[in-house]
Image (cartoon, rainbow, N blue to C red):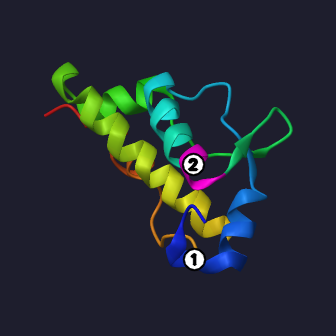
Amino acid sequence: MIVPEVGDAGQRQISSSNLRPPATADEGTQGWTRAFLERAGCTFSAEGEPLDIPSTPAVEALAKHPEYLGAVRLLLGSHVAVEALKDALGLPASNQAAPCVVRARPEPEP
């Protein structure tokens, strides 16, 4: 069992998950998302369920500074992975949109 906290039935649900990133996904965020989900037992293919991985412009807008890009990609990747695992287990999604959707909008000029 890869994720013992979910039990055998939960692990079977996770392992039966077939996912795919969108064509517009930020490569770094996609890498973290995929690493977390593959480690949990999910598979990826062109026919998989789409993941909500933000685009590079959205990730860059959230980071605001290049030195924060790595951390933002890690955090967003883990967020997308957790939401995908919750979906596989039939658990409700978070009440909020992904942080990149909420905070990546351009700030109004002062």
Q: Amino acid at mark 1?
A: Val
Determine the secondary structure under disc 2. Answer: helix
Tell me if 109 is positioned left or right of 37 in this view.
left
User: Residue at 74% across / 68% down in the picture?
Assistant: 12
Q: Residue 26 in the image: x percent, y percent? A: 50, 26
Instruction: State the separation of the CA atoms marked 2 and 1.
Output: 14 Å
Determine the secondary structure under disc 1. Answer: helix
Q: Which residue is mark 1?
A: 6
In this orientation, does residue 100 appear?
A: no
Q: Residue 7 in the image: x percent, y percent? A: 61, 79
User: Residue at 64% across / 45% down in the picture?
Assistant: 51
- Residue 82's disc is none
The dominant secondary structure in magenta is helix
Q: Amino acid at mark 2?
A: Leu
Asked if residue 43 is positioned above or below residue 86 in the image, the reply reads above
Q: Quadrant of residue 32?
A: top left
Residues shaded magenta: 37-41
Q: Could you classify mark 2 by the number of other residues whose Cα lies within 10 Å: few (under 14), some (14-19), or many (20 or more)?
A: many
Q: Residue 76 in the image: x percent, y percent? A: 40, 44
Tell me if 17 is positioned left or right of 67 in this view.
right
Q: Residue 45 in the image: x percent, y percent? A: 79, 35
Task: Look at the image and say whether residue 66 sits in the magenta stretch.
Answer: no
Q: Could you classify mark 1 by the number of other residues whose Cα lies within 10 Å: few (under 14), some (14-19), or many (20 or more)?
A: some
In this orientation, does residue 42 appear?
A: yes
In which quadrant is the C terminus drawn?
top left
Tell me if 17 is positioned left or right of 68 in this view.
right
Please give the count of numbered marks on the rendered protein.
Answer: 2
User: Residue at 51% across / 37% down in the picture?
Assistant: 54
Q: Which residue is mark 2?
A: 37
